[in-house]
Amino acid sequence: MELKPTKTLSGFIELLPAQQRCFDECAARMQRVLKTAGFAHLDLPAIERAEVLTDKDNWDEIETQMFLFQKGDTKMGLRYDGTVGLSRYVAGHLNDLAFPFRAYQFARNYRGERPQRGRYREFYQMDLDIMGIDSLSENYDAEIVATLARAYESVDEFIGPVNIRVGNRRFWNAMFAHLNLTDEQSRAAFVLIDKRDKISDFYDGLVETVGADAANEINNVFSNGYKSFAGLSDALDGAIGEMDAFMNLLDSMGIKNAVIDLGIMRGHAYYTGIVFEFFLDNFPELGAIGGGGRYEDLASKFSKTKIIGVGAAVGFSRLMVALLDDNRIDLTQFMHPVRAAVLCMGSAQVAYSMRVLAELRNAGIVAVPYLDANKKFKNQIEFADKIGADYSIIIGDAERESEMLAVKNMQTGEQQTITLADTIKLLK
């Protein structure tokens, strides 16, 4: 019989046990921070109607970007991020939720794009949002950045410190209006500014797009700073004041690692105000590891009620896999999750071994049995070593009859015979 392939499909991720334990621990720590900040955990459906996922009518066109399928007359697709599902959820429960409503998701998402390093077809993403009806104070922008900063701080022993770069699309909208740019020129300028650090001909591209005079003014934002444009228009003054207030709020919340960088734009056109991205100090080559911003009326296709929010997303799989694959995280503490292996030397010892196992687990000790009692001691002790057990508890005829336990330290080789109660004290 021909053997089936064991390799995963391209764009899908598998981790070894120690890597998975590290992944899970980081996810749990970050989620604890979000829960402490009062964010409700939402576990929304992975499958949505195709019409919910996209506004496009061309099935063939969107099929390349999403995982789509059809059951009967209903076209469906796997979610590609958390935003669309959240918008549908909030619009459908307006009367059930307290606003401003805050929630987070930690879920698998799916995209049909061509897989490459850092881009997967299946990946975990962490989303956190605060939403209001008709209005939402800009103070929440600072709160969501501070909350995400604390979440990253909870795992800094694994990923190192982060830095935050803050942009403002409202500033650029005011700037483009001051420069009398057309909508088409403004859209093109947004794209160029977003790619400023990635293209060598940024200035030439600006000149070609908006003309030399406007290009010089845009360039001056980066060379002279945004405050040099104060007094040119009410809209610019409002955006400048917004950034100053935002940074002051971050400072008051103890967030000292944020700077204004008006080259931060975020790719999504629905952002309308403050935008931000997080980067790793130790691994800047990974690029942004999370980001978000303020959006308005994102749920307009689900409800006539205007929903305004500020949100952030963490590409969790992308971050963790990059660090794990390159051995940038010390996995030592995740290599030995088992405190004790219970080794059963003969079928007569099975019942006593199971009693010992139950008592260890009742005491909160991670214990794994080897219940193929007819296997030789050599096989069983090799198993204990391979699963990374700190201790082996060896139960033979003598131990069963005396109700004692032979306890072996797997690191030093030292072995002692002690009671079950003393074993529990030793292992706790």
Image (tube, rainbow, N blue to C red):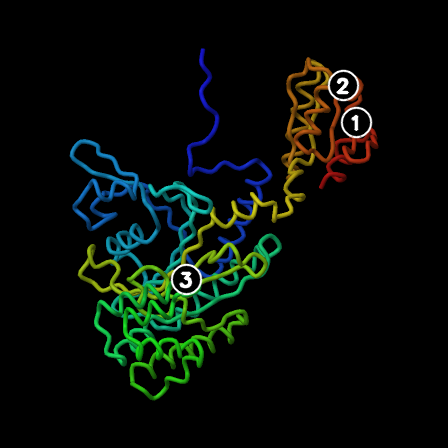
Q: Nearer the viewer, residue 50 or 130?
A: 50
Can residue 35 be seen in the rendering of this structure?
Answer: no
Farthest-out residue, bottom: 231
Sequence-wise, which precedes: disc 3 or disc 1?
Answer: 3
On the rendered image, what quadrant is the N terminus found in? Answer: top left
Which of the labelled discs sits on residue 71, or is there none? none
Element under label 3? Answer: loop
Sequence-wise, which precedes: disc 1 or disc 2?
Answer: 2
Position of residue 406 measured from the top left corner of the image (x, y, whole percent): 79, 27
Placement of 73 over or under 380, stated as above or below: below
Q: Are marks 1 and 2 in contact (CB under 8 Å)?
A: yes
Position of residue 285 measured from the top left corner of the image (x, y, whole percent): 52, 56
Quadrant for residue 407, please give it.
top right
On the rendered image, what quadrant is the C terminus found in? Answer: top right
Q: Which residue is mark 3?
A: 199
Identify which amino acid the numbered label 1 is placed on. Answer: Ala
